Amino acid sequence: MSKRTTWMISVIFLVIGFMIAIQYQTTKAGPVERDTRDVWEIREALESQQTQQQDLLEKISKADRTIEKYQEQSQQEQIETLKSSISTLERKLGLTQQTGSGIIIEVKPIFVETEEVQSYPSISPELLTRLINDLNKFGATEIAIGNERVTNLSPVRGVNGYTYINNRPLPPLPVTIYALSSNPEKLSDYMVVSQSKDYFAIENLELKVSIKSNITLPEYEDPLHLEVLQKGEMGETSE
């Protein structure tokens, strides 16, 4: 086997392995906390985890078939397969713009008539994380918050009282959230009655959901820090 072929197979394994690692990251359990959910909520969470595990097994099986097919191909076909795998990885990581149908969620403050002084509401990291989880759970395939693409690598955290995503603060309210979906109507119906809407209302925040047939999401702009894929090192390997 030539050095070039060996390098190409190594890259294919790396691409597939990284895609599986990203999927696995979404199924990892968080910090141990006291479970206060009722039986139905636990059952729904269990079904969600089983679906994710089944999806992961299917991805692993698909990766195995890709490797087998790759080993049977000519060198030119291997190059095309490599390009296709990298393109798929870039799309899954949100490194390219995506356009499609989906929903738009406008987050606006709610002010009630009262003599008391009201503070201007804001979106906490917990609320934002809950909303993102609900979108993913109910069928969103790609998400963006304002000009920030949301991926499995996107951190959501609080810094000095402000909510950050992708290491940048959320814009002031109102905030617009975009979500692509293969079934926007179903996603919209779910979000209208989701628990996220109730939790946002408690914090004096309104979620206004609308369906749109043509939504373009920006690409994820932060560096991935994958030194093995840096152009310089790949160039040295291929010589």
Image: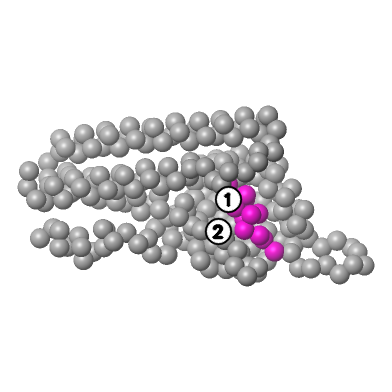
Q: Tell me, what colour scheme is on the image? A: one colour
- Residue 51: x and y in percent read 50, 32
Q: Is residue 59 magenta?
A: no
Q: Residues within 10 Å of mark 2 (few under 14, many from 20)?
A: many
Q: Secondary structure at mark 1?
A: helix
Task: Name which residue type carries label 1.
Answer: Ile
- Residue 209: x and y in percent read 66, 51
The circle drawn on residue 93 is none
Q: How many numbered circles are shown?
A: 2
Identity of the residue drawn at 31% across and 44% down = 17
Task: Name which residue type carries label 2.
Answer: Val
Viewer can see residue 11: yes
* Magenta range: 122-133
Q: Is residue 8 left or right of residue 212?
A: left
Q: Residues within 10 Å of mark 1 (few under 14, many from 20)?
A: some
Identity of the residue drawn at 56% across and 41% down = 137
Viewer can see residue 215: no
- Residue 204: x and y in percent read 77, 58
Query: Which corner quadrant of the image does residue 42 belong to?
Result: top right
The residue at which mark 1 appears reads as 132
Residue 85 vs 154, above or below: the answer is above
- Mark 2 or mark 1, earlier in chain: 1
Identity of the residue drawn at 65% across and 41% down = 34
The circle drawn on residue 156 is 2
